[in-house]
């Protein structure tokens, strides 16, 4: 049975911490309604989101992480073969490392739910057992 947590992708973090983002209000409302959903991501997602945020947004993101509002997971060298297999499987999408890392984390934690604006890629990506992701925002 899948985990009841949810993975968090870059677009949600940018929307949440950039007040001028078109999805900012939606992200804030989603987070308020999410209640006890355990949120998970990986450091490549945090780095990618920070690239799009101003200094205040980066600070707010880091403070949110520091408070424990989201679990940020490490990838290990043992997961590199899975990253590479996933990269080759979806080569036609030119996946970035952040997306690949979320797919690997999904495998590790058995999480199918994802908070993302990336309809194209996360509608195609599958876990090793063929299960698809379920977008729970937007």
Image (cartoon, rainbow, N blue to C red):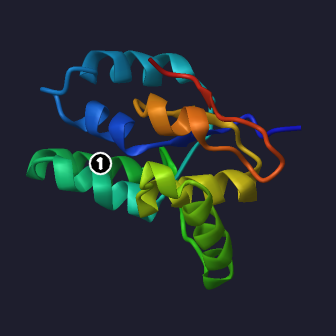
Q: Label 1: few (<14), some or many (≥20) within 10 Å? A: many
Between 87 and 127, the one nearer to me in the picture: 87
Seen as rendered, the residue at the extreme bottom is: 77
Tell me if 64 is positioned left or right of 41 in this view. Answer: left
Residue 66 in view, yes or no? no
Q: Taking 95 as reference, is 77 above or below it? A: below
Residue 24, how many percent across, how many down? 26, 23
Quarter of the picture holding the C terminus = top left
Between 126 and 53, the one nearer to me in the picture: 126
Residue 2, how many percent across, how many down? 81, 38
Q: How many marks?
A: 1
Seen as rendered, the residue at the extreme right is: 1
Which residue is drawn at the image coordinates 49% and 21% (left, top)? 137
User: Under tag 1, what secondary structure?
Assistant: helix
Q: Taking 120 as reference, is 83 above or below it? A: below
Between 19 and 112, the one nearer to me in the picture: 112
Tell me if 130 is positioned left or right of 25 in this view. Answer: right
Residue 110, how many percent across, how many down? 77, 48
Figure quadrant of residue 88:
bottom right
Residue 104, how many percent across, how many down? 64, 60
The residue wearing badge 1 is 61
Residue 39 in view, yes or no? yes
Tell me if 98 is positioned left or right of 105 in this view. Answer: left
Quarter of the picture holding the N terminus = top right
Which residue is drawn at the image coordinates 74% and 34% (left, top)? 4
Which residue is drawn at the image coordinates 29% and 48% (left, top)? 61
Which residue is drawn at the image coordinates 67% and 51% (left, top)? 106
């Amino acid at each position: 049975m899948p985990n009841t947590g949810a993975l968090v992708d870059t677009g949600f973090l940018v929307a949440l911490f950039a007040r001028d983002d078109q999805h900012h209000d939606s992200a804030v409302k989603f987070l308020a309604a999410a209640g006890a959903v355990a949120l998970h991501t990986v450091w490549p997602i945090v780095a990618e989101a920070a690239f799009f945020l101003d200094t205040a947004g980066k600070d707010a993101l880091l403070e949110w992480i520091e408070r424990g509002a989201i679990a940020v997971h490490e990838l290990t060298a043992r997961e590199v073969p899975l990253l590479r297999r996933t990269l080759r499987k979806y080569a036609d999408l030119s996946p970035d490392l952040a997306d690949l890392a979320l797919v690997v984390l999904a495998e590790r934690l058995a999480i199918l739910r994802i908070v993302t604006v990336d309809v194209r890629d996360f509608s195609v990506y599958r876990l090793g057992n063929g299960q698809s992701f379920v977008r729970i925002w937007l």
